[in-house]
Image (spheres, rainbow, N blue to C red):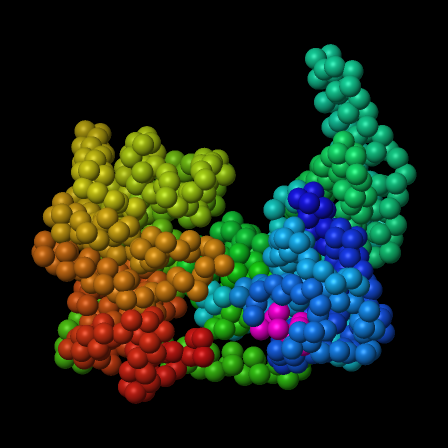
C-alpha cells in the first residue's frame, strides 16, 4: 500500500493541470482499491458548494454539472464533519440524496474522506461499491492517508488552473465548476503594495523549480541546449577515463549508459522539439526529463523504477551547464518582483539598484530573515504562498499586496487601478510622515524616547539618516558575510564598519557580532543540523571559533578609532558564562591593538535578550554589560515554540500573545533593576501598535527599519508614558492575542492614527 500511495502521489504531482490531476486520482484509486466507483468533489471557495469534478464509475456527463450545497447529501456530510463516513448501505442513511444525473442508483457501499488543506476542506474523495458492505479499515486508512498527501497537490493544481484561465489558456471550465483564482494567498511579510513583473529565481540545477518561459530566440536556445549536452557528455567521458580502471565492469557500464542516453534520439530530440515549439531550453528540458522519468516511475520492477533517478540526474547536469552559460547578462524588468521557493539575501543583491519592487516567497513568514530585509528596504513582501505555481509566473504582471499577504496574477483592469490608487495613497502617507523626520521623538509629557534604525546594508545609511534615526540600534554584520564566497578579512570588515560609524557619529552605532546559523547559513561554512534554530548559532559559533570572532572584534575596534560611538551587541546569549567569555575576548582584542600601537576607545557592550533563559537572567546579564537589547523575533519563536520560517504555524507566531508581553516586561524590569537601559530591536519595535505597549513597559529606546520609523515616531509623539502604561494594564487582563491587538489598534484609531493600522484590514 505504501508503494501504491507513493506512486499515485508522484504521478498526480507531475500533472500539468487540475483536470489531469483529478483524472489520475480517480483512475488510480479505483484500480488500487478495486472499487466500482471513485469520484472527487471540489469545494467552491465562495459558496462552499461541492462540485463533482472527476469520476470513474458514475455518469461522465455529470462531471462539472452536479453540485451539492454545504452539508447536502453524504458528500456534504463528509465535508461538514471533516472526517470519513463509511456506510454499508448509503441509500438507507438519512443524509443520502439521490442525484439521478450521476447514475449512482446501483451502488450501496459508500466511503467518503475529506481533502483538507490549511484547515479548509478543499473537497471530498469518494469510493462506492455495488454490494452492501462496510469498507474495511485498510481501505479507510489508505484513502485518508492519500487524501492528506494529495491536499497540497490539488491546491497547487487549482492555483495553476487559475493562472491558465487568467491568460485564456486551456479549456473553458464547465458551468458548475469551481471558479479558478488569480489571487494566491500567503502571509503578510512587509507592508505596502507593488505592481511589477515576476522574475523567478531558482537554485542551481533544480529542475522542478525551472519556470515556463517563451524562447526569445529559438535557434539560440537550441544551440545552447546542444552545447550543454555536449559538455555533459564530455564530462562523463572524462570521468569514465579517470575512474574506469578502478571500477568493476558493471559500474563502468553506467557511464556508457549515460553517454548513450545523451547521444540517443529520445532525450535530445524531444527537448529540441519543445524548444522549436517555442519553449526556452531549461523549460523544455524540464518537461522532457519529467516525462521520461515518469515512465520509469510507473514500472513495477524496482530496478527499472530506480532508473528514474538516473534520468533526473542527467537533467540536472544539463541544466547546470545551461545556467552557467546564461548567468551573465541577465536582464531585469524596470519593476522586478522576485518570486521563488525561498528567496535569499544573495538573490536580493543580484537585482540592480532601484529595480526591486517586491518579493514573493513560497516559504517563510513575516519574521523570516528575507522579510525583515524587505522591510528594511521599504518594499512589500508576501511570504508562505504554499500554492505558488512558480513555473507559471515568469514574466507575468503581478500585484503584491504586503498588507493582506496576497499575490494577484495578471490583474484585471479594475483590480490594477485599485492597487495603483492604493499605491498613490501609500506615497501620500509616506510624504506626510516624512515631515516628522526632523521632529524630536518626545512624548506629549516631554519624555525623550530615542528611535534608532536596524540595518545591515550600506545602502540603508542615507535612508536611515533622512528618516530621522538617532543612531543605529542594530547593524547586522552577517550581511557582508552572507554576500561573499569567503570570510571577509579584518581590513575589509573595518572599511565597512567605518563607513557606518562615521555616517552616524557622534550618534551611537550598535554592531551585532556575527549571527549566523538557523535560517542564515554561509555557503562556505556549512552547518548541517536536524534542528538549526536550537543548535550551533550566534555567540555559540563565534565563541567556538575565536579566530573568526577576534578578527571581527579587531575590525570593529579599529573602525571606532577617533570616533567613540561604537556599541557591540552579543547575540543568542543564554547565560552569564557566554557573556563573560565574550567580554574577555573583546578586552583581548583591544589589548592586542594597543600592543600594535593602535589606541582605540573602549566600546559599550550589550546583550541580546532573545531566548527565554535570558529573560529570567536579565538582571544578572545586565550587571555584566552596559545595556540590554530585546530581540523579539527570536524571543517570540522560542517562547511560543513556533518556527518563524514555517508558514504552517505562522499564525501562532503572535507578538501580542500575553506570554510574550509578560516576557518583554520581565526583561525590561530585570535590566532596570541592574541600572541598565533596555532597548527593543526586534520587529515589535517597528509595529506602531506594539510600540505603544513597549512605551508603556518603560522601554528606553526602540530600533526598527528606517521605513517604520516615521510611523512609530507619530505614536510616540501622540501618547504620554502614563497613557501607554494605562493601556498596557488594560490589555494585561485579556487572554487572547487578537483581543490585545484589537484594543491597541482601537486606541490608535481613537487618537487619529488609523492610517498606521491598515495592515491586515
Asked whether, in this view, residue 64 is left or right of residue 323, the answer is right
**Residue 310 visible in the picture:** no
> In the rendered view of the protein, which quadrant contains the C terminus?
bottom left
Quarter of the image that includes the N terminus: top right
Looking at the image, which residue is at 24% across and 81% down? Answer: 718
Report the magenta residues as a range: 73-80
Which residue appears at 72% of the width and 60% of the height?
133
- Pick whichever, 296 or 599, lies toward us: 296
- Magenta part, dominant SS: helix
Count the marks: 0
- Residue 38 or residue 663, whichever sits in front: 38
Extreme residue in the right direction? 265
> Does residue 612 sit above or below 430 in this rendering?
above
Is residue 529 placed above or below 162 in the rendered structure? above
Measured along the vertical axis of the image, is residue 729 above or below residue 344? below
Q: Residue at x 22, y 49 (%)?
A: 614
| 62 displayed left or right of 663 | right
Residue 411 % position (x, y):
65, 76
Q: Can you see residue 655?
A: yes
Q: Position of residue 611 (x, y in %)?
A: 28, 50
Q: Is residue 458 magenta?
A: no
Amino acid at each position: 500500500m505504501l508503494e501504491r500511495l507513493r506512486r499515485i502521489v508522484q504521478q498526480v504531482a507531475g500533472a500539468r493541470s487540475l483536470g489531469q490531476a483529478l483524472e489520475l486520482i480517480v483512475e488510480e484509486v479505483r484500480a488500487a482499491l478495486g472499487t466500482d466507483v471513485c469520484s472527487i468533489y471540489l469545494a467552491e471557495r465562495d459558496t462552499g458548494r461541492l462540485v463533482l469534478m472527476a469520476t470513474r464509475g458514475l455518469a461522465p456527463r455529470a462531471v462539472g454539472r452536479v453540485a451539492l450545497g454545504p452539508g447536502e447529501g453524504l458528500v456534504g456530510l463528509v465535508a461538514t464533519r471533516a472526517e470519513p463516513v463509511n456506510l454499508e448501505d448509503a441509500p438507507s442513511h438519512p443524509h443520502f440524496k439521490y442525484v439521478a444525473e450521476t447514475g449512482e442508483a446501483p451502488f450501496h457501499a459508500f466511503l467518503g474522506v475529506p481533502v483538507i488543506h490549511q484547515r479548509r476542506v478543499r473537497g471530498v474523495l469518494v469510493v462506492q461499491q455495488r454490494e452492501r458492505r462496510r469498507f474495511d479499515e485498510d481501505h479507510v486508512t489508505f484513502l485518508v492517508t492519500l487524501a492528506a498527501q494529495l491536499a497540497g497537490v490539488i491546491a497547487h493544481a487549482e492555483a495553476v488552473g487559475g493562472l491558465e484561465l487568467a491568460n485564456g489558456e486551456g479549456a473553458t471550465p464547465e458551468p458548475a465548476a469551481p471558479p479558478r483564482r488569480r489571487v494566491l494567498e500567503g502571509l503578510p511579510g512587509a507592508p505596502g503594495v507593488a505592481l511589477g513583473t515576476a522574475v523567478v529565481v531558482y537554485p542551481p540545477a533544480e529542475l522542478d523549480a525551472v519556470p515556463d518561459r517563451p524562447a526569445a530566440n529559438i535557434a539560440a536556445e537550441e544551440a545552447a541546449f546542444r552545447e550543454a549536452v555536449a559538455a555533459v557528455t564530455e564530462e562523463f567521458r572524462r570521468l569514465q577515463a579517470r575512474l574506469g580502471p578502478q571500477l568493476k565492469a558493471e559500474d563502468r557500464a553506467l557511464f556508457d549508459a549515460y553517454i548513450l542516453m545523451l547521444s540517443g534520439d529520445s532525450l535530445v530530440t524531444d527537448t529540441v522539439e519543445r524548444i522549436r515549439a517555442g519553449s526556452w531550453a531549461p523549460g523544455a528540458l524540464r518537461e522532457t526529463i519529467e516525462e521520461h522519468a515518469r515512465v520509469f516511475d510507473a514500472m513495477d520492477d524496482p530496478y527499472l523504477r530506480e532508473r528514474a533517478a538516473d534520468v533526473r540526474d542527467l537533467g540536472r547536469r544539463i541544466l547546470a551547464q545551461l545556467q552557467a552559460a546564461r548567468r551573465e547578462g541577465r536582464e531585469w524588468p524596470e519593476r522586478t518582483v522576485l518570486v521563488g521557493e525561498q528567496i535569499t539575501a544573495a538573490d536580493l543583491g543580484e537585482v540592480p539598484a532601484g529595480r526591486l519592487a517586491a518579493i514573493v516567497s513560497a516559504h517563510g513568514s513575516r519574521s523570516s530573515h528575507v522579510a525583515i530585509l524587505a522591510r528594511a528596504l521599504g518594499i512589500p513582501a508576501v511570504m508562505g504562498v504554499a500554492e505558488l505555481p512558480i513555473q507559471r509566473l515568469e514574466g507575468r504582471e503581478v500585484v503584491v499586496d504586503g498588507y493582506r499577504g496576497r499575490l494577484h496574477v495578471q490583474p484585471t483592469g479594475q483590480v490594477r487601478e485599485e492597487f495603483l490608487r492604493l499605491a498613490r495613497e501609500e506615497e501620500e502617507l509616506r510624504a506626510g510622515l516624512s515631515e516628522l523626520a526632523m521632529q524630536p521623538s518626545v512624548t506629549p509629557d516631554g519624555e525623550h524616547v530615542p528611535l534608532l534604525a536596524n540595518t545591515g546594508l550600506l545602502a540603508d545609511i542615507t535612508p536611515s539618516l533622512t528618516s530621522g534615526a538617532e543612531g543605529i540600534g542594530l547593524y547586522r554584520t552577517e550581511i557582508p558575510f552572507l554576500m561573499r564566497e569567503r570570510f571577509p578579512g579584518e581590513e575589509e570588515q573595518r572599511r565597512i564598519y567605518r563607513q557606518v560609524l562615521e555616517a552616524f557619529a557622534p550618534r551611537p552605532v550598535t554592531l551585532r557580532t556575527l549571527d549566523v546559523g538557523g535560517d542564515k547559513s554561509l555557503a562556505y561554512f556549512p552547518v548541517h543540523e536536524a534542528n538549526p534554530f536550537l543548535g550551533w548559532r550566534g555567540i555559540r559559533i563565534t565563541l567556538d571559533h575565536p579566530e573568526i570572532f577576534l578578527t571581527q572584534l579587531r575590525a570593529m575596534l579599529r573602525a571606532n578609532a577617533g570616533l567613540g560611538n561604537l556599541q557591540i551587541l552579543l547575540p543568542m546569549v543564554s547565560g552569564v558564562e557566554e557573556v563573560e567569555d565574550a567580554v574577555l575576548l573583546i578586552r583581548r582584542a583591544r589589548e592586542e591593538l594597543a600592543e600594535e600601537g593602535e589606541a582605540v576607545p573602549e566600546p559599550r557592550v550589550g546583550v541580546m535578550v532573545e531566548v527565554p533563559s535570558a529573560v529570567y537572567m536579565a538582571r544578572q546579564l545586565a550587571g555584566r554589560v552596559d545595556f540590554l537589547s530585546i530581540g523579539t523575533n527570536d524571543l517570540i519563536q522560542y517562547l511560543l515554540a513556533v518556527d518563524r520560517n514555517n508558514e504552517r504555524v505562522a499564525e501562532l507566531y503572535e507578538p501580542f500573545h500575553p506570554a510574550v508581553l509578560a516576557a518583554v516586561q520581565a526583561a525590561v524590569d530585570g535590566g532596570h533593576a541592574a541600572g541598565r537601559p533596555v532597548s527593543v530591536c526586534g520587529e515589535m519595535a517597528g509595529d506602531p501598535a506594539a510600540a505603544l505597549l513597549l512605551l508603556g513597559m518603560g522601554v528606553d529606546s526602540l530600533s526598527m527599519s528606517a521605513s517604520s520609523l516615521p510611523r512609530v515616531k507619530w505614536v510616540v509623539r501622540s501618547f504620554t508614558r502614563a497613557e501607554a502604561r494605562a493601556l498596557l494594564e488594560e490589555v494585561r487582563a485579556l487572554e487572547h492575542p487578537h483581543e490585545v491587538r484589537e484594543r491597541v489598534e482601537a486606541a490608535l484609531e481613537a487618537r487619529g492614527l488609523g492610517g498606521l493600522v491598515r495592515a491586515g484590514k
